[in-house]
Amino acid sequence: MLKTLASKNWVQNTILIAIIMALFYYWAFIFEFGYKFDWSVLYTVNPTYGENLGFYLIYGLKVTLQITLISSVLALALGTFFGLGRLSTFKPFYWVSTAYVEFFRNTPLLVQLFFWYFAMPHALPLEMRHWMFGLNYEFWCATIGLAIYTGSFMAEVIRAGIQSIDRGLLEASYSSGLSYFQIMRKIILPLAFRAIIPPLGSEFLNNMKNSSLAMVVGVADLTWQSQQIESLTFRGFEATTAATIIYLSLSLSMSGILNNVNARLRRTTYHQRDILSYGVNILSWPLLKIYLFIKRILWVFFPKKQAGLKLTPTQAILKQILSTTWTALVLMSKMLFAAVFVYGIYLGAKGLYSFNWQVILDNIGTLLVWRFPEGRSDDVFMGLGGLSFSILMAVIAISISFFIGLIVGLGRMSKNNIFRLPCMMYIEFIRGNPLIIVIFWVYFFIPVFFNTFISVFWSATIALTIFTGAYIAEIVRGGIQNIPKGQFEAAMSTGLGYYRTMRHIILPQALKQMIPAIVGQFIAIFKDTSLAFVIGVMELTYVAQILNNRLMIYPFEIYTTIAVLYFVCCYAMSIVAARLERRLTPDKIRLRM
């Protein structure tokens, strides 16, 4: 009786609402906060500064959108260019593309931004340096640096999309007389981009959230403005809550648009509709009608002419001239690229030769372990820091977040709303916000709720754990959903319950498929330990910043060293992930262009 009653949706929703109301009553009327809330700071004129500080968030949102849009376009162009380079048979182009993808994917974005902002200007003449900083260099440094970083991920997505195209389609295109660029423009790339919209959409979302790191180089984006309000009014809880809501709204809006585009381009005829899809359809309807109207007008005045199958002698000569000219241009471009490639290697070797290697040797121990084991009595783990601290944070976060992700992922798939809805809200809330916002929440505001103090190390580690748990939950859900439904039905028919079915049959098979994705998430969280810099954790990036401020004139040596340290660790893990993926997934033919 009770089991049947509990399976009803209205009963589950009633219990869930009762739990929410009880929690609200506890936090609103019983629990004593060590903090007095004042939400009026976001919408009233501040008497001290004589302006409405809520407009700071609007200005920050404008800057965030500018960085996101510009960097997304540049990243897509870079990803397409180097994604094709990863499939090229022209070795210099392939080597440069591979180096670009592997290096920028395996170093943290924060380190890259520090390099572009602090180190790169030192390689330029003083006059050019002044000219660059007069052109809002902070904004363009963050935007282009973000584009370069995101482009390396998009390159792999595009490469995978192109390789997913059947090889016979490429051979048929060549046999029909189409040139390389005609094949790419009219056949391969349209099909590839249609297939990669979901992962490409995820990269656009990550790009938007990663724009929050622009604050570390002095760009007044949304995150920077929220912290500015906190510093002016000491109302960080209200300002960060507003920034969180804005980021979450942006993420959900972008997800809705991308899901709607994906639904329109799917090969299946059935499309699942939701409120967000209808909203996107309503907003896009006028633009679509205008586009079709303009297209019809152009078709009337400029109709396409049908070309004959037989060429005249003049057309044949012209076609031969164009073909010869094109071949010559391709050969010249390859020679030019090879020359630039060799010159780039020369400049890189020259730059490495000019390094002050003694500075690196003198400080490599500090970068690896900070002061361990000779730390002060108030230091965490006997003065441990640097790279070892980053590894320790990543290991703790990934170990605990795996169990969080496993529980939440199973809850997300539950048919019971009491478990499914809270798990879904946790996943969407955490994944819809940048990690830097989650770190601020844990460090600055969780102590307010529990009237306690948490050290910067454990604050950053808890934030990384919570953040990673949401992503692993989606990996777990995807792995379980990939198991054929017949496995569940066969297990249930033998008398096994839900718990024993998941433990003995479903999860062992799903975990095998999830291992490569989990290793990839471990790489991501190891790079994200650099964000603990914002609250002063003695991880590798923070130690490097201390050394750079102390030495002043060796930013190239310091930031290049930590980039190499991050790259070595991440690339080693990516090799393990690639081997696991090859072992656990069927072989695929590599499509070369």
Image (spheres, rainbow, N blue to C red):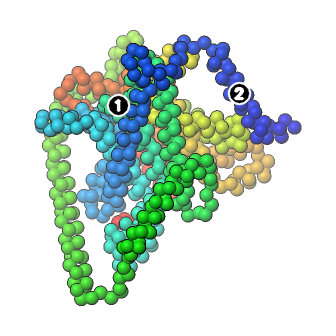
Q: For mark 2, does the 10 Å Cα neighbourhood hold few (<14), some (14 to 19), or many (20 or more) residues?
A: few
Task: Name the foreground residue: 561 vs 149.
Answer: 149
Q: Could one spot residue 442 in this view of the protein?
A: yes
What x and y, as percent, mark residue 211? 39, 38
Looking at the image, residue 35 lies above or below residue 52: above
Q: Quadrant of the C terminus?
A: bottom left
Identify which residue is drawn at 52% across, 21% down: 39
Q: For mark 1, does the 10 Å Cα neighbourhood hold few (<14), some (14 to 19), or many (20 or more) residues?
A: many
> Nearer the N terminus, badge 2 or badge 1?
2
Which amino acid, by three-letter code, is at mark 2?
Ile
Identify which residue is drawn at 25% across, 36% down: 137
Choose mark 2 or mark 1, whichever is in front: 1
State how many labels appear. Answer: 2
Dots 2 and 1: beta carbons under 8 Å?
Answer: no
Task: Name the foreground residue: 263 vs 40.
Answer: 40
In the rendered structure, the answer to whether residue 409 lies left or right of residue 158 reads right
What x and y, as percent, mark residue 372? 35, 20
Say which residue label 2 marks.
19
Say which residue label 1 marks.
220
Which amino acid, by three-letter code, is at mark 1?
Ala
Identify which residue is drawn at 73% across, 28% down: 18
Q: Could one spot residue 102 in this view of the protein?
A: no
Q: Secondary structure at mark 2?
A: helix
Looking at the image, residue 302 lies above or below residue 425: below
Q: Residue 470 — which label?
A: none
In the rendered structure, the answer to whether residue 316 lies left or right of residue 24 reads left
Q: Quadrant of the N terminus?
A: top right
Task: Name the foreground residue: 159 vs 70.
Answer: 70
